[in-house]
Image (tube, rainbow, N blue to C red):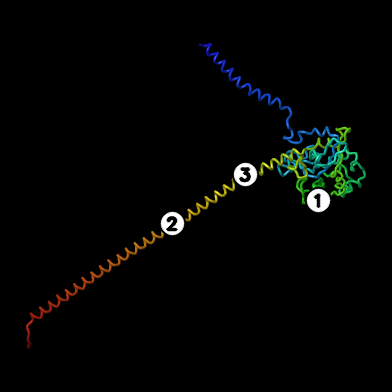
Amino acid sequence: MYGRHSVELSARVAFLWALATPVLAGQWWQNSGEGDYDTLKYGSSMDRDWLYSASSISMKLEGCILGYNTADSEDAGCPENESEDGTIYWYQMANCLRPQAVFSLYASDSSSTSCSSSTFKESFVTTFGFGEFIYYLAKYDENSPFNNQNDDYYGGDDYFSQNGGFNVENMPVCEEDGSGYYIGMGCSEYGDFVLKQYTDENCFQPLSDSDYESLSNINSLLKNYKDCTAAYTYGNDQDDSLAHKLVYYSDSCSSIDNSLCQNDDAMSSMLSSSKTQSSSKAKAQAGSKSWVTKLKYVAGGMLLVASFVMFTGILFTNRRRRRALMQRKYRQSKKGRSSRSKSRGHDGESKRSSARSKSRTKRDSDKDRGDSEPSGVFT
């Protein structure tokens, strides 16, 4: 008996294992076969093979935005992660916003790359500030206008002319201007690098929307990079190329982050699909909401009509009741008046009859008295 039960149990276990094995094996085979993941669905920064396989890379400067300074926060004048330095707002203790450069990279297998939509790869935002950006342009671009040591050529703006010329060490991080305010770098509404006047020692709160100094000479030289500039050519050392150095100290960005950032194909398709889904969802919600709204209006109208009918019925019912009550009171008061008048007539008649009987009795008594007295004249 025991052996029979053990055989049946073993057979059941074997049968269940036979059923489960294809499923588990299929899942294992499916998972093991997916060796190549589509990294673009996690972001364009996950797939940058073009950065090392392209024959040439070009750069285009998009403009200036306020971004997080994470590469070297101390040199950028950022406060520490505490409130002892006089920072008012809690989010400014760790998040240090400084003017950053937004640039886009274009790559191809040709000896030179034009900045077009067909060769666009990715947009970036620096994390080390404007001064370091100029430093990398001067160091890793042999044709950079910032290589010229003549201060009047590239740094003839008023601030730098009065403060020893333009260089990275002389860049105003957050300098006191002697009038109770501070001078620091900022971004204009057109995406240019400018000097602004701030009210706090960390240069977080601008005094006004206007610029303290436009830095027209420096922005004029940066226009060379706003057109299209070679950042890497095949055969050069990638460790010393402008494109690779800037990417290493920069973060990827898209139009979701700022309008100056461009979108690659993966981001564009993802945004278009999300817009399509959101629009279809919005239409579906609008359709359902329209029906719900119509139903609400119909129900509200019916309740309003029912309330009006109820109010009218109550009004007429109360009016009939008041009229019946008034008629009843009128009849009762009329009946009371008639009964009172009858009682008054009866009392008067009885009084008159009693008076007549009294006068009649008196006359009879006088007559009897006259008959009893003697007639004639006494002398």
Image-quadrant location for residue 75: top right
Q: Earlier in the sequence, mark 3 or mark 1?
A: 1
How many neighbours does mark 2 have within 10 angstroms: few (below 14), some (14-19), or many (20 or more)? few
The residue to which callout 3 is attached is: 284
Give the structural element (helix, strand or loop) at label 3: helix
* Residue 258: image location, x then y, percent: 75, 44
Q: Nearer the viewer, mark 3 or mark 1?
A: 3
The label on residue 211 is 1
Give the structural element (helix, strand or loop) at label 1: loop
How many neighbours does mark 1 have within 10 angstroms: few (below 14), some (14-19), or many (20 or more)? some
Image-quadrant location for residue 100: top right
Please, what is the three-letter code of the amino acid marked with disc 1? Asp
Please, what is the three-letter code of the amino acid marked with disc 3? Ala
Front residue of 185/277: it is 277
Q: Is residue 201 visible?
A: no
Residues at circles 2 and 3 in contact by the CB criterion of under 8 Å: no
Please, what is the three-letter code of the amino acid marked with disc 2? Gly
Front residue of 144/306: it is 306
Image-quadrant location for residue 25: top right
Give the structural element (helix, strand or loop) at label 2: helix
The label on residue 313 is 2
Front residue of 175/50: it is 50
Residues at circles 1 and 2 in contact by the CB criterion of under 8 Å: no
Q: Earlier in the sequence, mark 2 or mark 3?
A: 3
Q: Could you tell whether 346 is left or right of 18 in the image?
A: left
Residue at mark 3 to residue at mark 1: CA–CA distance: 48 Å
Residues at circles 3 and 1 in contact by the CB criterion of under 8 Å: no
Is residue 349 depicted above or below 139 in this figure?
Answer: below
* Residue 191: image location, x then y, percent: 80, 47
Q: Nearer the viewer, mark 1 or mark 2?
A: 2
The label on residue 295 is none
